Image (spheres, helix red, strand yellow):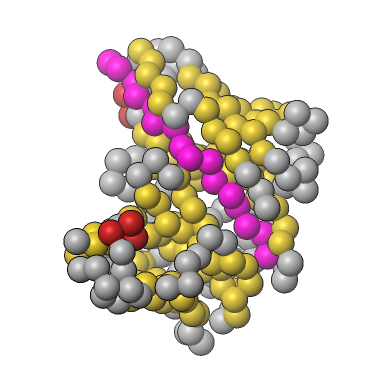
Amino acid sequence: DSGVTQTPKHLITATGQRVTLRCSPRSGDLSVYWYQQSLDQGLQFLIQYYNGEERAKGNILERFSAQQFPDLHSELNLSSLELGDSALYFCASSVGQGGTGELFFGEGSRLTVL
Amino acid sequence: GENVEQHPSTLSVQEGDSAVIKCTYSDSASNYFPWYKQELGKRPQLIIDIRSNVGEKKDQRIAVTLNKTAKHFSLHITETQPEDSAVYFCAARRYVSGGSYIPTFGRGTSLIVHP
């Protein structure tokens, strides 16, 4: 158990809908990273938050947004969903801003858009 | 930004053989290179890492080598076992503005170890 909690584990929805994925980092970790894992695409970096502030952005679509709350949990909001958004979404956390090395991943949220 | 290429995408070996996975990176500022193992249906987990001031690191049957000049690094697994079967991801981490370090991952290598 990495200590990172993600909910829901599985989510099935229709095109055009909006969903929210939730992540609770390990106790004491201030950074949260969101990654998208599609078939054959590896782990695509979406966005990073540190202590409530956005710190880095990757290939995140404008239809997607995220935030980190004062209690350090984070939410990834996906709107106007398309079939191609079907993927496994991972949240990871680290103590600092990534300089210490290891990222601890949650179990992921599998999104299926029909 | 950083670009990480990983090869091969699939690697099939017999139990007891060695396996080698290779990665190249583009950003010379990258200074930390972790390897993650993802078993089927599970989360990625760090198995070994190497920093830019080191050329090689070993941990039992696993070793990683780094060639900064050529910008490539490799994972070596000796005496493979069926439980080594998984997807392996390399990553290169670089500093970005705002004080953050972001790892960029390769596309992964599916290692299959046949008993």
Q: Is residue A11 visible?
A: no
The image shows residue A36, relative to residue A49, as above or below, that is above
Q: State whether the magenta stretch is mostly helix, strand or loop.
A: strand
Out of B54 and A83, give the one closest to the viewer: A83
Q: Which percent across, then down, holds residue A70?
A: 51, 87
Query: Does any portion of residue B30 appear in the rendered image?
Result: yes
Query: Residue at the location (48% across, 84% down)?
Result: A69
Residue A1 located left or right of residue B47: left
Q: Is residue A19 above or below residue B12?
A: below
Please state the horizontal and vertical placement of residue B18, each as a whole percent of the image.
Answer: 48, 15
Which quadrant holds residue A81? Answer: bottom left
The residue segment tinted magenta is B100-115
**Magenta run includes residue B106:** yes
Quadrant of the drawing holding the N terminus of chain A? bottom left
Check if residue B33 falls in the magenta segment. Answer: no
Q: Residue furthest bottom?
A: A70
Residue at the location (72% across, 71% down)? B98
Q: Position of residue B106 (x, y in %)?
A: 53, 41
Number of disc labels = 0
From the image, which quarter does the C terminus of chain A lie in? Answer: bottom left
Which of the two residues, A42 or A16, is positioned nearer the viewer here? A16
Q: Tell which of B89 and B84 is nearer to you.
A: B89
Q: Nearer the viewer, residue A7 or B70?
A: B70
**Residue B5 on image: x %, y %:** 58, 36
Determine the image quadrant of residue A99.
bottom right
**Residue occupying the point 34% across, 24% down:** B112
Q: Is residue B104 above or below residue B111?
A: below
Residue at figure coordinates x 79%, y 39% from the top left: B53
**Left or right: A94 in relation to B43:** right
